Image (cartoon, rainbow, N blue to C red):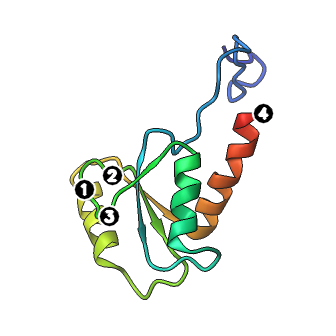
Amino acid sequence: MTNRDNPEIIFITDPAESLTHPFFNKQIVFTGALSTMTRSEAAKQVKVCGGSLQGAVTQQTDFVILGDKRRGISTKQRKAEHLINQGHDIQLIIEDDFLWLISMKEDIQK
């Protein structure tokens, strides 16, 4: 249901309806080293949010997380960009945005 005064505001009509995290049931790939945590720690955070890790970018990949410590464009990023150009729905996310997204898990679980 939308607010008539502001169509961008959406109200959830059923309070029992649970919100899911953007990573829930999504395939996630990391490329480049993260500056704030190890890849293992990041993988745990993804799993807490309901996501799964992939080692390589495929047509089933949903998100590619670009670590801050990467040097140039990685093979994984090139593959993701190639698949995006073919029409696949893959999102490239920088590390800061990844950190913001995983911080959402507390808000969604409340």
Question: Which amino acid type is marked by label 1?
Answer: Thr
Q: Which residue is mark 2?
A: 61
Q: Which mark is residue 110?
A: 4
Foreground residue, 84 or 19? 19
The kind of secondary structure element at disc 3 is loop
C-alpha separation, residue under disc 2 versus residue under disc 1: 5 Å
The kind of secondary structure element at disc 1 is loop
Question: Which amino acid type is marked by label 3?
Answer: Gly
Comparing labels 2 and 3, the label whose residue is closer to the camera: 3
Comparing labels 4 and 1, the label whose residue is closer to the camera: 4
In the rendered view, does 95 fall on the left or right side of 64?
right
- Characterize the local packing of mark 2: few (<14), some (14-19) or many (20 or more) Cα atoms within 10 angstroms: many
Residue 87 in the image: state x and y as whole percent.
Answer: 25, 48
Q: Is residue 4 above or below residue 80?
A: above
Comparing labels 2 and 4, the label whose residue is closer to the camera: 4
Residue 26 in the image: state x and y as whole percent.
Answer: 42, 44
**Quadrant of image for the C terminus:** top right
C-alpha separation, residue under disc 2 versus residue under disc 4: 28 Å
Q: Earlier in the sequence, mark 4 or mark 1?
A: 1
Q: Is residue 40 above or below residue 9?
A: below
Foreground residue, 87 or 12? 12
C-alpha separation, residue under disc 3 versus residue under disc 4: 31 Å
Q: Which residue is mark 1?
A: 58
Q: Quadrant of residue 79?
A: bottom left
The kind of secondary structure element at disc 2 is loop
Question: Which amino acid type is marked by label 2?
Answer: Thr
**Quadrant of image for the N terminus:** top right
Question: Which amino acid type is marked by label 4?
Answer: Lys
In the rendered view, does 43 fall on the left or right side of 16?
left
Q: Which residue is mark 3?
A: 55
